Image: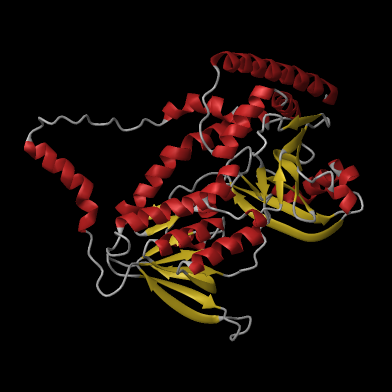
Amino acid sequence: MNSIALKSFIGLRQSSPETPHFSAQPKPITIHRKFKVLAGKYSPKIQGRNLRVAIVGGGPAGGAAAETLAKGGIETFLIERKLDNCKPCGGAIPLCMVGEFDLPLDIIDRRVTKMKMISPSNVAVDIGRTLKPHEYIGMVRREVLDNYLRERAKENGANIINGLFLKMDIPKDKESPYVLHYSGYDGKTGGVGEKRTLEVDAVIGADGANSRVAKAIDAGDYEYAIAFQERVKISDEKMVYYENLAEMYVGDDVSPDFYGWVFPKCDHVAVGTGTVTHKGDIKKFQLATRKRAEDKILGGKIIRVEAHPIPEHPRPRRLKGRVALVGDAAGYVTKCSGEGIYFAAKSGRMCAEAIVEGSENGKRLVDEGDLRKYLEKWDKTYWPTYKVLDILQKVFYRSNPAREAFVELCADEYVQKMTFDSYLYKTVVPGNPLEDLKLAINTIGSLVRASALRKEMNKLNV
């Protein structure tokens, strides 16, 4: 369904027309085009060292960026305060991420091949019938995934600093260094930490929704959700049910604008929910989510409680000078599904690739134009996906009748195939015109029934 709607929105942002090449063009035009392409190569060469870049934040975005930079000849520093951080996150990753980021299978707790979408009236729809034998959704624990990416970056030459980023001094010209102030924790300075500074040529802000790097460049605020999650240890007998199954609950009781989830981990399940509009009621929604799944997690013991803000849309500014934002710091979490891990890692890698290319593998300084190439590539690739999921959330999460319609649509095998193909591989899947037409008719029918149901419910409430 995502990919079907996607085709209608690709044209919202007009792409730049390609200039045809004619061998008979006058020489001045050829010189102009050559100058335009190579202008970035005239940035100053660095003497006696390589380009120095700091990454603030050691999640998937920071770890992926650090590895790419280190491999590309950049002197890389990654600052992370909580090296054992357990972010409240469902932990779902698409199949393409496993291959794209060369993730070992032993860090994937579960391979989900079945999902249950459960409506406000507890109508359950089984999803996953269209998956091929080798296809699955990976379930990971963030503390395991994040640590693996950081350690791999370290093996490739990145310097991992256990520290808390405090502030940053912005240079007044295009060549002077950024000065980062942080508290360093090395086991010798106790819990307070030691005040230290670090001078670098560029900075990547990968420090999450409450990004201090974003504040330093006046990136602006954004609306955010509160995600609340409990890790629940259940019996081995009950874990059999969740061996390769995840559940998603929708309804005003679990969230007025998102969904509740039960996702399987290695020896427990993650039970959580989120909301933008009613943050003060998050514990009430969490209790309702546990209640909806009660028969399957009854007797379970809560072993960890986690809460964290999740961005709802990109920040007004994601780049300034030689500072760029990636991951949650930039606002790269999709609406409707709440997916963020893949997009965090992908944005970190894309930003780092732009720096490596612009600096000629660390030999030259970079400028805002080099980093802007990352944003242009990102927006061109993923902006339509974010826009479509935003629209889907507004249409189907607005009321319980609309959620019933959404679950009803999820039972359609064509919807499942298009949705899973788009999610697993992050590509726009061509649809079948006849099936697209049938889906459009079914969608309208479901929404009409939802509207009628909502009117009847309103009459009962009068």
Residue nearer the viewer, 72 or 172: 72
Residue 272 at least partly seen: yes
The answer to whether 66 appears left or right of 92 in the picture is left
| Side (left or right) of 255 relative to 199 | right
Residue sitting at 16 percent across and 47 percent down?
A: 35
In the foreground, 317 or 425 = 425
Q: Nearer the viewer, residue 64 or 393?
A: 64
Seen in the picture, residue 353 relative to 247 is either above or below; the reply is below
- Quadrant of residue 389 in the image? top right
User: Which image quarter: residue 433?
Assistant: top right
Q: Residue at x 43, y 44 (%)?
A: 378
- Report the number of numbered marks: 0
Pick out the residue farthest to the front: 133
**Residue 62 coordinates in the image, percent (x, y):** 51, 60
Residue 64 % position (x, y): 50, 57
**Residue furthest to the bottom:** 188
